[in-house]
Amino acid sequence: MTESLFLWQNLPGWMVSLLWVVDLGIRIVMLGVVPGNRRPTTAMAWLLSIFFFPVVGLGLFLLFGNFKLSQRRIDRQTDVNQRVIDATATLDVDNGPPDAPEWVRSAIELNRNLGAFPLQEGNQFDFITDSSESIRRMTEAINQAKDYVNAQFYIVGDDPELTGPFLTALEDAADRGVRVRFLFDHLGTMRTEGYRELLRRLRGSGIEWRRMLPISPLRWKWRRPDLRNHRKILVIDGETAFTGSQNLIEPGYKRKSSHKLGREWIDLMARVGGPMVTGLDVVFATDWSQETDEYLLEDLNEGGVPLPCGTTTGQIVPSGPGFESENNLRLFNTLMYSATEKLTITSPYFVPDDSMLYAVTTAAQRGVEVELLVSERGDQALVHHAQQSYYLQLLKAGVKIYRYQQPMVLHTKCFTVDDEVAVFGSSNMDMRSFSLNLEVSLMLLGSRAVGEIKKVQDAYKEKCTLLTLEDWLDRPRTMRYLDNVARLTATLQ
């Protein structure tokens, strides 16, 4: 305000009066606009910025304040949800396995109501923890494709050793008559070294490709710029799929600083067989229709659902701003509150809202063994400091925090609840993944599937150090200050 008075002192009286009216009008109007359908903490952060800096705060709010997709995209998502519900209305496994606890059945019903997908039996999962091996196996699967390949990744980067052969496999498949569809997030991939060369390569191929959630003002394509499609899905011929946390890029993310430090991103992918492959294909088809106006659901129906080939029962959990509610957050909280013995969470970005923070700390306080696996040093400084601001409260509640030794980035997103449920996929444990990103997670049931994920988590713990409350209290005051400041930015959604 002092700065405003200084700038206005040489203006004519009538102009100063007008500016005062505009300034006051912005504050009064936004006081009734900002709180609508937002968390109180988020609304308060926006209001403070607008009250202290009305013009700048208003501009930022107009640019970043709306976390919903366009009405056209929301309508298409709603249409797909209804089609999935109608097509799977006769399935009789929605109540879950006969020996499943009641809270598992409740979570299944929640997913069905919010995300539309049914529970599906007879699936096979082969978990892959080596990023290079994962890309090689996906490349091999593409080389066997006969009908179509549907691929989407948040980040894509071309390199000679790993992703280059993957892209070559896509090109070769298209040349031999396989229909190849390829999606990647516009802004997520644009920041990667070699982006222009990647576009030239795609333009010279027979691959059908699109940028997800593109920003192109000259073509009237505009939205909140930090909305992202964060999903990672590969489907071959409707029979085999891959999904998880890994982007289509070499483990060092084509960053010179990472290569110098020996830093790599540690991920978890799964090769999927069985009926859930169709569910992942439907998620891809939804995103493809959003960018191309081409509906693929009818084509998927013609191929039928793959026959059961395993023993795992699971459910697809799509989420994002195209849905009315934050269904991944609701599911995660429900499962965490249901834990009775052990809850183990692995996440590169653990920046929870109040509801999840209460779910995790309450579980620890009622005697559940709660473990949190995170990176000792994150790849995004602001997010990492925001994450660290929660450690004190978590440690005091009894949560065990394991930090994966630097310079590696533990990028896997998964959690296990007792011996009953495991969830893995692309969704982080932060407000961005709950509100701004389009994500896909898989909920798997039963001790066998949970045991496989637990083996991965146990292997991670062997490369972690346990953080104690005493050590955390001894950290420098400057670190505490940075953590607390970063925590404020987490609410501006």
Image (tube, helix red, strand yellow):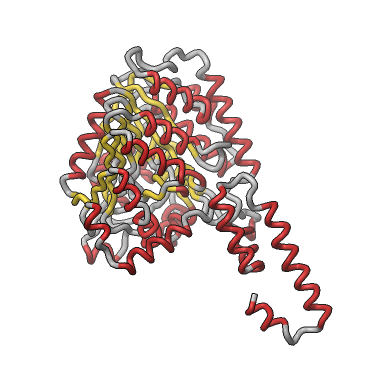
Q: Position of residue 359 (x, y in %)?
A: 40, 38
Residue 165 seen in the figure: no
Q: Quadrant of residue 477?
A: bottom left
Q: Is residue 156 above or below residue 57?
A: above
Question: Is residue 294 visible to the viewer in this orientation of the structure?
Answer: yes
Left or right? Give the position of 287 relative to 429: right
The residue at 74%/87% (across/down) is: 10
> Residue at the location (33% across, 46% down)?
347
Q: Position of residue 95 (x, y in %)?
A: 43, 16
Q: Is residue 18 above or below residue 84?
A: below
- Can you give x and y, in whole percent of width and height, for residue 167 in the image? 35, 48
* Nearer the observer, 262 or 101: 101
Residue 351 location (% of width, % of height): 40, 50
Q: Residue at x 65, y 42 (%)?
A: 71
Q: Nearer the viewer, residue 491 or 185?
A: 491
Q: In front here: 320 or 12? A: 12
Res 457 quadrant in image: top left
Query: In terms of depth relative to the viewer, which is nearer, 365 or 269?
Result: 365
